[in-house]
Image (cartoon, helix red, strand yellow):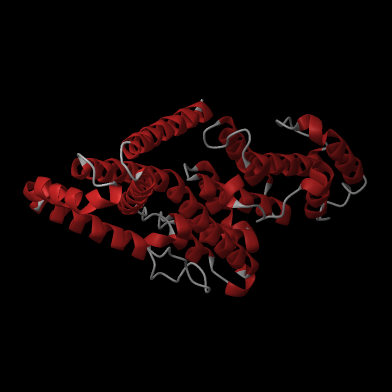
Amino acid sequence: MDLHKDGVAKVGMGSVVGAGLLGLVLYASTSTDWAGALGGGLVVAAAFAVAGAGVGFLFGIPRLLTSGAASRPDDMSATSTGSYSPNTNLEQVSDWLTKILLGAGLTQIGSLPGLLRELGHALAPVVGNGPGAPAFAAALTVYFTVIGFLSGWLLTRLRLAKALSTADRQTLDDSVRQTRARARELNFTTAEVEKLFATQTEGLQVQALALLQGDPDPENYHLILRAVSSELPPFVLLQALLAAKAAVEHGGLAPEQRRELRFAVENKMRNDRAVPPDSRRRVVAGQILKLLAVEAAVPGGAVPEAPEASEVAAAAAAAAAAASEVLADPVLPAVPSQASGGDAVTDGAERPSVGGGRPGGE
């Protein structure tokens, strides 16, 4: 449906441009110097179309939503490498120029007809200087200025916002990688991580969860559980699930904590809006359930039913067989090795790293 609408829009815009060019050709054919009139008319049409597109671009520049790190450009507490903030100079210039153009246009609107007549007489020799040349030149400039404005505005609204969003998300993803790699070196305390997450600022919440990915600590379990259970933006939720996966892989969670985390992840997976079927969030959530299923096989010898139970049956059976030989020694810490092994069996070479993946696939 979207492709159909896009095709209709292109055909419609092409028809409007074609109608203007057809009128120019027909008018030039009535001139004694039709080639000169046609060439001059095309130059005038192109010049005013470009001018209109430039104004449309200024009006169409998207305004930056101040959520995430951009709303706190001076806050360097998220990481020692600093928070990233998009440059908004173009947005500010656009805002100033549009206000100036609107103000100037409104003050001069009464003299607009006279200005158009003067413009038509000035351009009449360019389009052949035949009968009605001033009126035709004025109409040509208005026609292609409007077309250029609409084209520039639509392209800016449809394309530029997406391009800027992708660039900003890539910047944030790079910041997350740096934070995750240096989490142990930064040595944030549990209270400091909680303070970052409690800001309700998307960029700082992401940084807090990246710290938990790079330095998993059972003391931060309650924060991970709260993040997974909360309503979060897609990219923040992805980081929360990655932090939960890192905590499970690291080991040290009590049986009750594993059950709570499993329940929270299963509830989140039931929400197709929060965790769409084709998203990276669902992939990571499935991996968490597999890891928890394999861990549950160690102390009890039975794998609880999970959405991916058929995929992890072989891994769970192997874990249970290995665990039966060491159950006599209650202090043997077998959980981390079994969890790691289960992940390797179930995910294989396709298992992403704790923080891997582009945000675009969240």
Q: At x 38% / y 71%, what residue is drawn?
A: 74
Placement of 154 over or under 191, stated as above or below: above
Q: Quadrant of residue 267?
A: top right
Q: At x 53% / y 49%, what residue is drawn?
A: 235
Report whether residue 302 is seen: no
Q: Residue 77: image x %, image y %?
A: 45, 70
Q: At x 72% / y 51%, what residue is drawn?
A: 352
Name the residue at the front extreme.
Answer: 32
The total number of labels drawn is: 0
Front in this rendered view, residue 59 or 188: 59
Placement of 333 over or under 312, stated as above or below: below
Please give left or right for residue 141 compared with residue 215 in the image. left
Name the residue at the left extreme.
Answer: 110
Q: Residue 330: image x %, image y %?
A: 82, 51
Please give left or right for residue 257 compared with residue 70 in the image. right
Q: Residue 188: image x %, image y %?
A: 54, 69
The quarter of the picture where the C terminus appears is top right
Q: Residue 164: image x %, image y %?
A: 46, 54
Front in this rendered view, residue 86 or 127: 127
Placement of 313 over or under 217, stated as above or below: above
Front in this rendered view, residue 18 or 69: 18
Report whether residue 86 is seen: yes
Please give left or right for residue 159 compared with residue 258 in the image. left
